Image: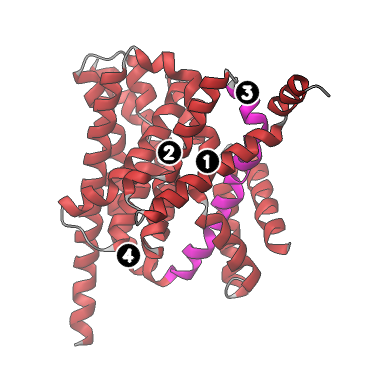
């Protein structure tokens, strides 16, 4: 095999893109750990940036990249199922916090939907944009389904959901510090309700209790957003 | 092997339940509920299940990378309205985290206070 043909073969191989994904993440994690895991050095964010640069420079289409990366993506489902273990371990604490969790869910779900929509409307954005924005705090899969049903643009919603996840992971602790909330359940729950799995990953890095409440918030908010978004959009449409 | 098999099989069962009932929840979340029920019946997770789930959750941040890279396909879609999008996301994330954290923290303190009093 000539070197050029060999290179083509490698670029076409899913193994290359799988290795790049794991390598970028490993590098991002090592750098983050080296500097004491500050939120700005979010490994998800910097892995994405590094891989996007490689794909743009090499002119590789996303579809080809995903042929390799899908094996990592596939583990998201089992990882969500795995959240049952920390949730079970902290059942007693969650039960004791039932009222706080219920209150946080109502406030968090409504605030997440309304605040994004209202800013877009204030700035003169069109209906397709604010409907795409509305379910962004649910996990990407749920958010896309809701957005599509209500007249939004699902791929745009997916991008907004991921950006929301990264922003919450990066800013979460600073915001909680600014409003002087120190307890792990409240901090974790706020990050999970606002910024789903990506902030849940960050919350687990900070403390297991924070991660557990983030996971709980993420699961509850997925359902709550699916139920509340059509109602909120319906009211806004009627108000014009 | 039992642990990874269970995680995948429970997600599959979850997907099947969602397909047949039309519940507005991803199959994996149903799988989470099913695993929680199994743990409750068993009275805890096996050592292997603890290890496997610990490994997955320690690397949760990795699992969002492939979907995140998908952003490149939609950069032109965002480019024309990026200021509005950045403003909305920043405001929404800040307000929602702050309001939720304050609500949970206040309510937790209020329900903890009488209990603390009772133990005194």
Q: Which residue is mark 4?
A: A97
Horizontally, is A19 left or right of B93 in the view? right
Nearer the viewer's eye, disc 3 or disc 1?
1
> What chain does mark 3 sit on?
A
Q: Quadrant of residue A98?
A: bottom left
Can residue A149 be seen here? Answer: no
Q: Separation of disc 2 and disc 3 at Cα?
A: 20 Å
Judged by its main secondary structure, the magenta piece is helix
- Cβ atoms under marks 1 and 2 closer than 8 Å: yes
Q: Earlier in the sequence, mark 3 or mark 4?
A: 3
Q: CA distance from mark 3 to mark 1?
A: 18 Å
Q: Earlier in the sequence, mark 2 or mark 3?
A: 2
Magenta range is A62-91
The answer to the question of whether label 3 and label 4 lie on touching residues, with beta carbons closer than 8 A, is no
* Residue at mark 3: A63
Q: Which residue is mark 2?
A: A46
Q: Nearer the viewer, residue A212 or A91?
A: A212
Alpha carbon separation for disc pair 3 and 4: 44 Å
The 10 Å Cα crowd at callout 3, few under 14, some 14 to 19, many 20 or more, is few
> Dot 1 corresponds to which residue?
A24
Q: Earlier in the sequence, mark 3 or mark 1?
A: 1
* Mark nearer the N terminus (1 vs 4): 1
What colour scheme has been applied to the protein in the rendered image?
Answer: secondary structure
In the image, residue B12 lies at what x, y percent?
68, 46
Residue at image location 23% in from the left, 68% down from the top: B111
- Residue B109 circle label: none
Asked whether residue B2 appears in the rendered view, the answer is: yes
């Amino acid at each position: 095999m000539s070197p050029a043909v060999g290179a083509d073969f490698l670029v076409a191989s899913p193994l290359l893109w799988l290795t790049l994904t794991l390598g970028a993440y490993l590098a991002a994690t090592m750098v983050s750990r080296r500097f004491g895991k500050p939120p700005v050095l979010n490994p998800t964010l910097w892995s994405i940036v590094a891989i996007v640069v490689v794909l743009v420079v090499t002119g590789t289409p996303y579809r080809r990249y995903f042929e390799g990366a899908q094996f990592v993506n596939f583990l998201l489902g089992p990882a969500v199922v795995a959240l049952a273990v920390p949730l079970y371990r902290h059942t007693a604490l969650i039960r004791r916090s039932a009222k706080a969790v219920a209150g946080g869910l109502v406030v968090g779900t409504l605030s997440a939907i309304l605040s994004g929509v209202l800013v877009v409307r204030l700035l003169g954005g069109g209906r397709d944009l604010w409907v795409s924005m509305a379910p962004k705090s649910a996990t990407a899969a749920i958010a896309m389904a809701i957005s599509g049903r209500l007249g939004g643009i699902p791929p745009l919603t997916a991008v907004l959901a991921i950006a929301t996840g990264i922003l919450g992971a990066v800013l979460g602790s600073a915001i909680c510090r600014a409003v002087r909330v120190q307890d792990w359940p409240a901090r974790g729950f706020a990050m999970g309700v606002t910024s789903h799995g990506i902030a849940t990953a960050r919350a687990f890095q900070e403390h297991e209790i924070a991660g557990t409440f983030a996971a709980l918030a993420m699961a509850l908010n997925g359902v709550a957003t699916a139920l509340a978004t059509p109602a909120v959009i319906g009211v806004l449409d009627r108000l014009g | 092997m039992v642990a990874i098999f269970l995680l995948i099989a429970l997600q599959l069962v979850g997907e099947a339940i969602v397909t047949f009932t039309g519940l507005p929840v991803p199959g994996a979340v149903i799988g989470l509920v099913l695993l929680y029920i199994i743990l409750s019946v068993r009275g805890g997770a096996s050592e292997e299940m603890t290890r496997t789930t610990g490994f997955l959750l320690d690397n949760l941040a990795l699992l969002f990378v492939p979907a995140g890279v998908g952003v490149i396909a939609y950069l032109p879609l965002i480019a024309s309205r990026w200021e509005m999008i950045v403003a909305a996301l920043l405001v929404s994330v800040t307000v929602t985290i702050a309001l939720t954290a304050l609500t949970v923290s206040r309510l937790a303190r209020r329900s903890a206070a009488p209990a603390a009093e009772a133990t005194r």
